[in-house]
Image (tube, rainbow, N blue to C red):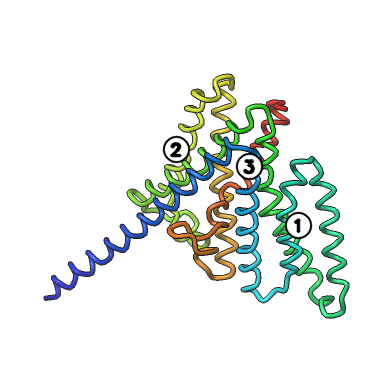
């Protein structure tokens, strides 16, 4: 009887794992299909997808902050975040961020908000920078020469690396990477993600044939490292507020969880392309 009970528990665990994997695969296929359509589709489709992703991710970010009991100007933050992709499109993001900061300070001039001015202004503005401005560099990449291909390259490497880390970690993961920040990540999974990213970067020769081998290798290494650090950065925020997922996207956590590894990677790719490779 105890053996039967153990078998039943094992089957139940396997069923739950398969169900979770199925949800993850379904959500991943949906996001991948939508992303490819948006990247290579008309500008209005791309900008609409940007607004949805930014708006939902920023809303989740402020929800995490609220768990710490810190009052933020959520409406101003989300509103500014939704306008930032258009400011980037017009190359006015620097001016827009200055105005956003000014408006936030003015919002905390009210007597009832004064006591929380430092944390309120700081965290509201950080949400605009961290989620919207960083991710809005995708708009700037798309406007470059062969920009759609470069944006596809970035998303493919980051999310391909995520998948590599996930499956290698599931199969071979033994050594915890940084357990107190992300308990499910392993050193073996990190190496799997690293290798997958570099291979995908080298294979980009099929759709970016004019890019040298050394640029593809160096970019692959940099993206492999930055994407995983970007993922861990969002995990640090979630651990601080004691939640596993930022939202409720089936199998993937939340919109912020979907974007986390892209948030620091996309700006890096944009500045590498424009400052090192001199793309315009």
Residue extending furthest bottom?
112
- From the viewer's side, name the closer residue of 131 and 271: 131
Residue 276: image x %, image y %? 70, 28
Dot 2 falls on a residue whose secondary structure is: helix
Discs 3/1, front: 1
Decide which of tag 2 and tag 1 comes sooner along the chain: 1
Q: Nearer the viewer, mark 3 or mark 2?
A: 3
Q: Is 248 left or right of 121, judged from the image as shown?
A: left
Circles 3 and 1: CB atoms closer than 8 Å:
no
On screen, 180 above or below 34? below
Tag 1 or tag 3, which sits nearer the N-term? 1
Q: Which residue in the protein does label 3 denote?
A: 266
Q: Which residue is depicted at the point 72% across and 74% down?
A: 71
State left or right for residue 183 relative to residue 108: left
On the rendered structure, is 24 left or right of 148? Answer: left
Label 3 crowd bin: few (<14), some (14–19), many (20+), radius 10 Å? many
* Measured Cα–Cα span from mark 2 to mark 1: 36 Å
- In the image, residue 1 sits, relative to residue 173, either above or below, namely below
> Please, what secondary structure does the residue beneath circle 3 have?
helix
- Nearer to me, 77 or 168: 77
Return the residue at label 2.
196
Q: Which mark is residue 80?
A: 1
Instruction: Depth check: give the residue in front, 240 or 134.
Output: 134
Q: Is residue 133 above or below residue 6?
A: above
Secondary element at tag 1? helix
Estimate the spatial distance between the alpha carbons at disc 3 and disc 2, rounded to whole Å. 18 Å
């Amino acid at each position: 009887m105890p053996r039967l009970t153990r078998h039943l528990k094992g089957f139940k665990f396997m069923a739950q794992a398969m169900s979770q994997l199925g949800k993850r695969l379904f959500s991943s296929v949906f996001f991948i299909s939508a992303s490819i359509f948006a990247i290579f589709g008309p500008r209005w489709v791309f900008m609409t997808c940007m607004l949805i992703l930014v708006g939902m991710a920023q809303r989740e970010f402020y929800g995490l902050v609220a768990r710490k009991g810190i009052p933020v100007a959520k409406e101003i933050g989300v509103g500014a975040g939704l306008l930032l992709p258009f400011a980037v499109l017009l190359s006015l993001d620097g001016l827009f961020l200055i105005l956003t900061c000014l408006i936030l300070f003015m919002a905390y001039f009210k007597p009832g908000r004064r006591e929380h001015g430092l944390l309120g202004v700081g965290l509201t503005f950080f949400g605009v920078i961290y989620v919207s401005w960083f991710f809005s560099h995708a708009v700037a990449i798309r406007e470059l020469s062969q920009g759609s291909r470069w944006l596809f390259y970035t998303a493919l490497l980051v999310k391909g690396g995520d998948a590599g880390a996930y499956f290698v970690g599931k199969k071979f993961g033994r050594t915890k990477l940084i357990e107190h920040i992300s308990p499910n990540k392993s050193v073996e999974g990190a190496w799997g993600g690293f290798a997958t990213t570099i291979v995908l970067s080298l294979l980009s020769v099929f759709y970016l044939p004019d890019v040298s081998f050394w640029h593809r290798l160096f970019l692959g290494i940099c993206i492999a490292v930055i994407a995983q650090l970007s993922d861990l950065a969002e995990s640090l925020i979630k651990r601080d507020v004691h939640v596993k997922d930022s939202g409720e996207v089936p199998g993937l956590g939340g919109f912020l969880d979907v974007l986390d590894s892209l948030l620091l990677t996309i700006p890096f790719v944009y500045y590498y392309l424009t400052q090192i490779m001199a793309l315009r």
